C-alpha cells in the first residue's frame, strides 16, 4: 500500500470509531505506565517496545493491569504482508501496592518492564536520546494526545460533556456540537550569532540541568509571523535586539511541558548589547566562541545521557553541555559549530 | 522607548488586569460591530480606523451602543510623545432595530461607520486586501483573541468557570487553577512544482470564489514536523507523492475559519502522477504552466477585489485568479512566476 492510501486510511480510522474498534484486537501497541515509557533495554540506541494486542493483554493481566481503547490513542498505520494495522499508544496507571506489600511499586514496574522485554524510562530523556526522528515524533504524538484527551472532558463554551473520538484526534460537544482538536503551538527556537558569525549566544533555563546551555525559544503569540515571534522572544528573554532573522528548514514536535512544534531560526545581533535576562525563565545568557561551543558539543557527544553533570553552583553556570542529539537545538548548534549556518541571506 | 521595553511592557499588561484597567481610558481602539471590521473608506489601500477611547465612547453612545474592557482585547503598545498606551480591539454586537423601525440595521451600521470616519467590511476581505503586514497581523490577532475569548468560558477539565484576563491572553480555572491560552495551529501551505520548475499544481477549494486557484494547505497534526505535514496534506488533498520539500522563509497568521499560522513550503512532484482530489475539501486540482499562472497573477493585480469573478459553472473551474495580495499564497505564487523559487537544495 502506498503513502497516499496509508494517509487516507489513517484519516478514515481517525473519525470512524467503529472501524477502529474492530481493528483494535489486531493492532500493535506502545506503552506508558504512570507516564513512563516502555523502551528497549539497549543503550544508547533507545526505541519504543512495540507489542501485539494479545501479548500486551496477557503480560499486563499477570500484573492485574488492563487496557482498552479508552486509554489508547491512534499513532500510525503499519504495513503487514497483506494490509495495514493500527499502531496505538496506550497509557495506564498502576495501582499502588498495599501498604504491607513486601515489594515496592518501583520494583513491580521493573519486573513488568522485564516481562514486556524492556524498561520504563522518563519521557523527556527518551525524547532527548532516541536516535530515529520517527520514534521521537511518534512519542511526541503519544504524549500530546494522551495529555490532551485527559484534559478535554467538557465543552469550554457550554460545559456539556465532550464525546472523545476513539483515535483521540478530536472531541465533539454532545450539546452544542462544537468539535475540539488536539492543539499544539508553534515555537521559535533561535540560534543568535554575532555579525562575524564566530560567536553564539546561548542560555540556561531556570531549573534545567546544570551546565547545559541552549538556544532561545518561546511560544508564538496570536497575530505573529514566526520571524516576529523569534524577534520578540529574544527581546523578552535576553533583552537584546536582532538585526536579522532567517528560518532554517528544520522543525520538531515537542510534547513537554506543553505540546509545541519547534521551528528553527538563526538571528544576527550585535555583540556589544547589554544582556538582561528575564529572571522568571532564565538563569543566565552568555556569548561563547565557536571553540567553546565545539568543546561542549564534544562533551555532549561523549556523554549522551549527561551523566557527568556538574553539581556545584558555580560550575552549573559554566558551559559544559548542549542538549542531547534528540533535540532540535542540538542539531542547530552542531550545524553552526560545523560552519554550515551562514549569516547571509537574512532579513527581518 | 525601545523594542525590548515595549515587549516587556506588553508582557506586563497582559497579566496585570488592574494596570490594564487603569490604562483603558487613555487607550486607542479598533472596532468590529457584528463581526464586521471598521476600515478606512479609501480603496484599495485599506487600513483599520483607530479611535481614541473618548471618541469611540461618544460616537457609539449616539447609537445606544457601549463597550468596555470585557469585550476588548489587547493588540499592541503604541508610542506617544511621553510614554506608551495600549491599542485594543473592541468587538460589540448591535441590537436589531425594532420591527416597525423605518430604518434597516444595515443602514444604521452604514451611518455608524460614517460617523466613525470609515465603513464596515468583511474580515476575510480585509485580510486579503490590506497592504501592510502589520495591519493584517493585528487583525489576525483581533479576530483570533475575540473568538477564543467567546469560547473559553468553562474549564475543559473540570467545567468550573474560567477567569478571563482583561487582555484576553489567557484564562484561569477558578477551581483547578489550570491556565488556558489562545491557541492557533501551524498550517503548511505548499506550492507544488514539477522537476522542470515550469509547471505548478494549484487547487480550487470547495465553496471558494469561482476561478480562484491557490496552493495546497492544511493543519499540522500532533507529532509531525512541518515537512511531514506538507507531505501528508499533499497526499490527502490531491493524492500524489512528492520527491522533496523545502520550507521558505515566509509565514503568516491567518484567523479564519480557525486560527492558524501559515508556513510556506515548496515541493517537487512528478507531473505524470494521477491526481485524485479529496472531494470534501477540493473541487479540482490541476497543473498549470508558468505562463498560465502569470496571466492569472496579472488579472488578480488588475482586479484586486476580484470583482469580475466568473459566474458560470464551467468557467468557475478555469484558472482566472490567484488569491489577492494579502494572502501568503499570493506572495508564494508571485515569487514562483518571477522565477525566484528555485528547485535546488530540497529535501524530504
Image (cartoon, coloured by chain):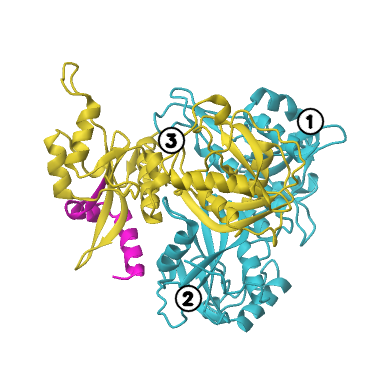
Chain colours: A cyan, B yellow
Give the answer, above or below, for where B153 lies relative to A35: above
Specify the quadrant of the image occupied by residue B148: top left
Residue located 30% across and 63% down the image:
B9
Pointer 3 chain: B
> Which residue in the protein does label 3 denote?
B158
Between marks 3 and 1 in the image, the one whose residue lies nearer the viewer: 1
Mark drawn on residue A269: 2
Q: Is residue B327 left or right of residue A25?
A: left
User: Which label sits on residue A250?
Assistant: none
Residue B34, quarter of picture: top left
Is B120 situated left or right of A225 in this image? left
Chain ID, mark 1: A
Residue B258 percent across, percent down from the top left: 46, 39
- CA distance separating discs 2 and 1: 55 Å
Q: Which region is colored magenta?
A: B1-30
> Which disc is residue A26 wearing?
1
**What residue appears at the point 20 percent right and 45 percent down from the top-left corner?**
B117
Amino acid at each position: 500500500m502506498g503513502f497516499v492510501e496509508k494517509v487516507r486510511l489513517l484519516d478514515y480510522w481517525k473519525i470512524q470509531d467503529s472501524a477502529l474498534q474492530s481493528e483494535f484486537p489486531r493492532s500493535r501497541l506502545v506503552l506508558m505506565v504512570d507516564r513512563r515509557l516502555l523502551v528497549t533495554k539497549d543503550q544508547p540506541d533507545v526505541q519504543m517496545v512495540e507489542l501485539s494486542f494479545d501479548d500486551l493483554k496477557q503480560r499486563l493481566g499477570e500484573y492485574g493491569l488492563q487496557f482498552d481503547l479508552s486509554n489508547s490513542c491512534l499513532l500510525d498505520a503499519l504495513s503487514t504482508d497483506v494490509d495495514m494495522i493500527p499502531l496505538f499508544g496506550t497509557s495506564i496507571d498502576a495501582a499502588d501496592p498495599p501498604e504491607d506489600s513486601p515489594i515496592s511499586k518501583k520494583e513491580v514496574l521493573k519486573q513488568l518492564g522485564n516481562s514486556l522485554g524492556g524498561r520504563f524510562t522518563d519521557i523527556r530523556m527518551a525524547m532527548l536520546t532516541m536516535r530515529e526522528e520517527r520514534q521521537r515524533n511518534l512519542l511526541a504524538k503519544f504524549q500530546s494526545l494522551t495529555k490532551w484527551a485527559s484534559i478535554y472532558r467538557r465543552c469550554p463554551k457550554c460545559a456539556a460533556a465532550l464525546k472523545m473520538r476513539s483515535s483521540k484526534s478530536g472531541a465533539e460537544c454532545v450539546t452544542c456540537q462544537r468539535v475540539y482538536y488536539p492543539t499544539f503551538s508553534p515555537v521559535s527556537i533561535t540560534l543568535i550569532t554575532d555579525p562575524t558569525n564566530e560567536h553564539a549566544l546561548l542560555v540556561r533555563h531556570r531549573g534545567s540541568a546544570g551546565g547545559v546551555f541552549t538556544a532561545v525559544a518561546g511560544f508564538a503569540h496570536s497575530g505573529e509571523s514566526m520571524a516576529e515571534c523569534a524577534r520578540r522572544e529574544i527581546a523578552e528573554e535576553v533583552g537584546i535586539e536582532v538585526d536579522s532573522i532567517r528560518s532554517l528548514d528544520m522543525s520538531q514536535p515537542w510534547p513537554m511541558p506543553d505540546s509545541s512544534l519547534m521551528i528553527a531560526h538563526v538571528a544576527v545581533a550585535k555583540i556589544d548589547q547589554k544582556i538582561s535576562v528575564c529572571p522568571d525563565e532564565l538563569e543566565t545568557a552568555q556569548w561563547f566562541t565557536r571553540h567553546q561551543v565545539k568543546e561542549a558539543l564534544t562533551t555532549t557527544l561523549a556523554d549522551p545521557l549527561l551523566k557527568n553533570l556538574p553539581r556545584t553552583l558555580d560550575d552549573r553556570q559554566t558551559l559544559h553541555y548542549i542538549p542531547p542529539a534528540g533535540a532540535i537545538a542540538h542539531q542547530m548548534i552542531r550545524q553552526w559549530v560545523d560552519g554550515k549556518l551562514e549569516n547571509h541571506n537574512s532579513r527581518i
